[in-house]
Image: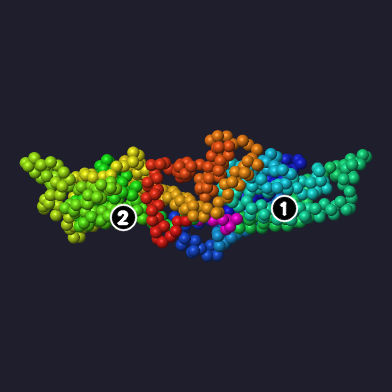
C-alpha cells in the first residue's frame, strides 16, 4: 500500500512533533518490467552476490528503492534540536529496515520521511491531527485531507504519565496517502489494527503509571503547598520518551513490525479489478471489421444524410427496411454495414431473397429488383423501401419515359435492364484481399443511386440514439476506430436502459397478477388520516409514489382523501420512469422494440 504510517506526539516544550515514520520503497526495475520485457530478465538474472554487493555500495543504503546518503544525512540532521520525547532514534542509530524479497519492497522506519516533499505533508498532517482536527472525546479515528496535501486517517489517543501535565500525554497515529478511495475503503481494517496497537501501548503505559503511583502519590505531591525547589522541578515533569512511558525498550521495533505489516496487508487486502456483467459482444456486434460491408461513415456518405436518417429511424423503432436492386454484392454490403448500428437481437437480416419475407422474420431484407411487395404490406406503413438503381438503368428509364410519355410509377423501376458493367461489378476477382474488395465495393456503389420509394409515417422526432450517432458520424475529427467504439458505447448504454425498462414492466405484470400482495387502499387511507399531522394539499403526492422504482405499490389506487387523488396515473408513472432513465417519449418506440425478445440473448434472463 503506497502510504506513510507515522506516530506523532504533542510535546509540552516543542508542540506537535513527528516521532516515527514507516514507508515502503520499491525496486525501480519493477516499474520498467511493465513496459520493457528485457527488464524481467535482468531481475531474474540477479543472484545473491549481486544483491549483497549492491547493498554494500556507498551510494545505496538498502536493498530495494535505493536512497542516497545525502538524503538520509539531511533527514538525520533535522533531529538534533528535538528533546527525548520528540525523538525515536538516537543520532547514531539509523532506523529499521525490513526487506520483502518476493515483492521486492523495503520497509524503512526512521525519525522522519526520507523525502523532503513527504516530510512537509506529514508535518502538516501532524499539526492538524493534534491541534484542530479532533474527534469528540479527543480520542478516536478521524479523516481529513485534500488532493494537494494528501488524505489522512488520524487516530488520537492518550498515554498515562505521572510527570505529564494532566498526568497524560497526547499521541496520534497517521496514515497518509494520495488515494482517497483506497484509504476510505480500508477504514475498518486500518482502524481495527491501529486500535490493537494503541491498546497495547496504553496498557503498558498504565502499568508503568500504576507502579510509579504505588511508590509515591504524585497527585498529592503536586497539591502540596510547601515544596522545595528541587522537588517542584522534578514533579512538574521532564519530557520522557515513548519507550520509557510504556516500559519497553523494544517499542520502536514492535511499532516498525506493526506498521510494516499494516502496509503489506493493506496492499494485499484490496486490489483493483474490473467487474462487469456479460461481455459487450453478447449484445453488440464487433464493428472493428465490417467484412464486405462499408464503414458507418461510408454508409452515411453513400446514402446521403436524409436517406440515412429516415432508414435508421425506421430500423431503431422496429420497422422493416427493404433494399431492392439488381446487384447482389451492393445489397449484401449495405446490409453488413447496418449490423454495428443495432443490438444483436434487433438485427435479423436476409441479404438477398427471391421473394418477400414478412417483417416478423427479418427487419432487414434484400430483394431482387423484379420482386413485388404485397399491397397489404405496403398499406400497413411498417416498412421503408429503398430502391438501388444503377445510373445507366436510371438514364434508360428516363429515355423510355420521354419516348412513351408514360406516367411514373413504382412499377417502372422494375424494368429488367441488362447491364454488363453491373454483372462485372458483382464478380469478385480471385486473389483480392479484403481491403481491395472494400475498395471495389466503394467504386461499384458510385455507379448506383438510392431512393426511398415507399415508407410509413415516422414520429416527429427521432430517438436520442440516432441523434448521437449522426453527430458522431458528421464529426470528421473522430477516427473510424474511435467512431465504432463510440457507437458501441451508445448502444450498450441504451441496452442497460432497456434492462431497467423490462424490469419495471415485469414488476407491473406481477402486481397486476397478484393484487392480494398489495396493501389495502382503505387501510392506507385510514392510516394517513389518523397519523399524518401534515395536511395534504391539492396536487401533492406521496414520496413513495414519486419513486420510479416502486411500481408495484403504485399500481393500486389507495383511494382518495378529501377528494384529492393520492396516486399518480399510469401516464405520470411512465413520465417519471423515462425521466429516471434519461429518456423522453420519443425514445419509447426504441425501448419497446429493443425490449422485445431481449431475454433470448445467449439464453440469459435480464431480470
Q: Residue at x 83, y 48 (%)?
A: 162
Q: Which of marks 2 and 1 is nearer the N terminus?
A: 1
Q: Pointers 2 and 1 in contact (CB under 8 A)?
A: no
| Residue 456 seen by the camera | yes
Q: How many marks on residues? A: 2
Give the residue at x 55% y 59%. Answer: 104
Would residue 579 be counted in the magenta stretch?
no
Q: Which residue lies furthest to the left in this view?
A: 403
Residue at which label 1 appears: 198
In the rendered image, the vertical position of residue 261 relative to residue 316, given as above or below:
below
In this rendering, position of residue 174 left or right of residue 549 = right
Q: Nearer the viewer, mark 2 or mark 1?
A: 2
Which colour scheme appears in the figure? rainbow
Q: Name the residue under label 2.
A: 360
Image: magenta residue range: 266-273
Residue 244 placement (x, y as % from top left): 78, 52
Q: Is residue 277 left or right of residue 22?
A: left
Q: Label 2, secondary structure: give it.
A: loop
Tag 1, which secondary structure?
helix
- Indicate the quadrant where residue 400 lies: top left
Asked whether 269 falls inside the magenta stretch, the response is yes
Judging depth in this view, the residue of 349 and 555 nearest the camera is 555
Q: Position of residue 149 (x, y in %)?
A: 59, 41
Q: Quadrant of residue 280?
A: bottom left
Picture coordinates of residue 54, whole percent (x, y): 55, 58
Instruction: State how far apart marks 2 and 1 are (Cα).
Output: 72 Å
The residue under the point 28% across, 44% down is 456
Inspect this view and state whether residue 122 appears: no
Amino acid at each position: 500500500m503506497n502510504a506513510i504510517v507515522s506516530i506523532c506526539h504533542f510535546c509540552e516544550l516543542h508542540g506537535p512533533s513527528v516521532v516515527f515514520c514507516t514507508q515502503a520503497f520499491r525496486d525501480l526495475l519493477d516499474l520498467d518490467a511493465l513496459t520493457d520485457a528485457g527488464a524481467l530478465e535482468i531481475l531474474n538474472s540477479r543472484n545473491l552476490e549481486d544483491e549483497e554487493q549492491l547493498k554494500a555500495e556507498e551510494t545505496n543504503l538498502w536493498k530495494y528503492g535505493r536512497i542516497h546518503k545525502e538524503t538520509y544525512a539531511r533527514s538525520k540532521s533535522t533531529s538534533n534540536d528535538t528533546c527525548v520525547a520528540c525523538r525515536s532514534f538516537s543520532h547514531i542509530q539509523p532506523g529499521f529496515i525490513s526487506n520483502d524479497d518476493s515483492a521486492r519492497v523495503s520497509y524503512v522506519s526512521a525519525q522522519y520521511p526520507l523525502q523532503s516533499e513527504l516530510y512537509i505533508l506529514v508535518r502538516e498532517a501532524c499539526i492538524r491531527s493534534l491541534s484542530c482536527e479532533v474527534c469528540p472525546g479527543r480520542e478516536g479515528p478521524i479523516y481529513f485531507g485534500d488532493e494537494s496535501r494528501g488524505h489522512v486517517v488520524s487516530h488520537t489517543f492518550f498515554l498515562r504519565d505521572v510527570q505529564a501535565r494532566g498526568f497524560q500525554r497526547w499521541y496520534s497515529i497517521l496514515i497518509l496517502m494520495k488515494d482517497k478511495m483506497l484509504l476510505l475503503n480500508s477504514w475498518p481494517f486500518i482502524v481495527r489494527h491501529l486500535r490493537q496497537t494503541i491498546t497495547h501501548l496504553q496498557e503498558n503505559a498504565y502499568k508503568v503509571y500504576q507502579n510509579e503511583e504505588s511508590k509515591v502519590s504524585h497527585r498529592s505531591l503536586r497539591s502540596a503547598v510547601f515544596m522545595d525547589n528541587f522537588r517542584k522541578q522534578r514533579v512538574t515533569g521532564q519530557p520522557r520518551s515513548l519507550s520509557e512511558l510504556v516500559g519497553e525498550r523494544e517499542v520502536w521495533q514492535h511499532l516498525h513490525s506493526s506498521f510494516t505489516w499494516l502496509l503489506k496487508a493493506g496492499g494485499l487486502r484490496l486490489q483493483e479489478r474490473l467487474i462487469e456483467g456479460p461481455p459487450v459482444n453478447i449484445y453488440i456486434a464487433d464493428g472493428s471489421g465490417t467484412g464486405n460491408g462499408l464503414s458507418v461513415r461510408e454508409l452515411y456518405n453513400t446514402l446521403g444524410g436524409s436517406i440515412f436518417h429516415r432508414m435508421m429511424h425506421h430500423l431503431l423503432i422496429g420497422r422493416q427496411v427493404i433494399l431492392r436492386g439488381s446487384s447482389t454484392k451492393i445489397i449484401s454490403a449495405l446490409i453488413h454495414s447496418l449490423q454495428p448500428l443495432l443490438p444483436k437481437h434487433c438485427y435479423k437480416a436476409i441479404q438477398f431473397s427471391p421473394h418477400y419475407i414478412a417483417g416478423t422474420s427479418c427487419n432487414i431484407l434484400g430483394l431482387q429488383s423484379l420482386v413485388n411487395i404485397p399491397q397489404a404490406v405496403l398499406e400497413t406503413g411498417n416498412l421503408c423501401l429503398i430502391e438501388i438503381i444503377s445510373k445507366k438503368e436510371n438514364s434508360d428509364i428516363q429515355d423510355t419515359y420521354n419516348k412513351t410519355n408514360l406516367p411514373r410509377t413504382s412499377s417502372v423501376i422494375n424494368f429488367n435492364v441488362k447491364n454488363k458493367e453491373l454483372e462485372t461489378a458483382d464478380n469478385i476477382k480471385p486473389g483480392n484481399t479484403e481491403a481491395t474488395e472494400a475498395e471495389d465495393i466503394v467504386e461499384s456503389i458510385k455507379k448506383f443511386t438510392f431512393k426511398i420509394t415507399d415508407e410509413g409515417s415516422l414520429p416527429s422526432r427521432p430517438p436520442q440514439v440516432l441523434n448521437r450517432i449522426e453527430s458522431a458520424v458528421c464529426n470528421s475529427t473522430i477516427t473510424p476506430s474511435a467512431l465504432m467504439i463510440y457507437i458501441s458505447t451508445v448502444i450498450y448504454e441504451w441496452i442497460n436502459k432497456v434492462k431497467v425498462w423490462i424490469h419495471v414492466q415485469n414488476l407491473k405484470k406481477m402486481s397486476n397478477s397478484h393484487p392480494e400482495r398489495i396493501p389495502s387502499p382503505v387501510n392506507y387511507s385510514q392510516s394517513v388520516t389518523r397519523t399524518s399531522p401534515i395536511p395534504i394539499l391539492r396536487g401533492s403526492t406521496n414520496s413513495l409514489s414519486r419513486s420510479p422504482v416502486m411500481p408495484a405499490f403504485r399500481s393500486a389506487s389507495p383511494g382518495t382523501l378529501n377528494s384529492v387523488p393520492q396516486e399518480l396515473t399510469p401516464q405520470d408513472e411512465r413520465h417519471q420512469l423515462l425521466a429516471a432513465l434519461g429518456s423522453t417519449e420519443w425514445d419509447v418506440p426504441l425501448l419497446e422494440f429493443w425490449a422485445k425478445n431481449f431475454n433470448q440473448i445467449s439464453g440469459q434472463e435480464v431480470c
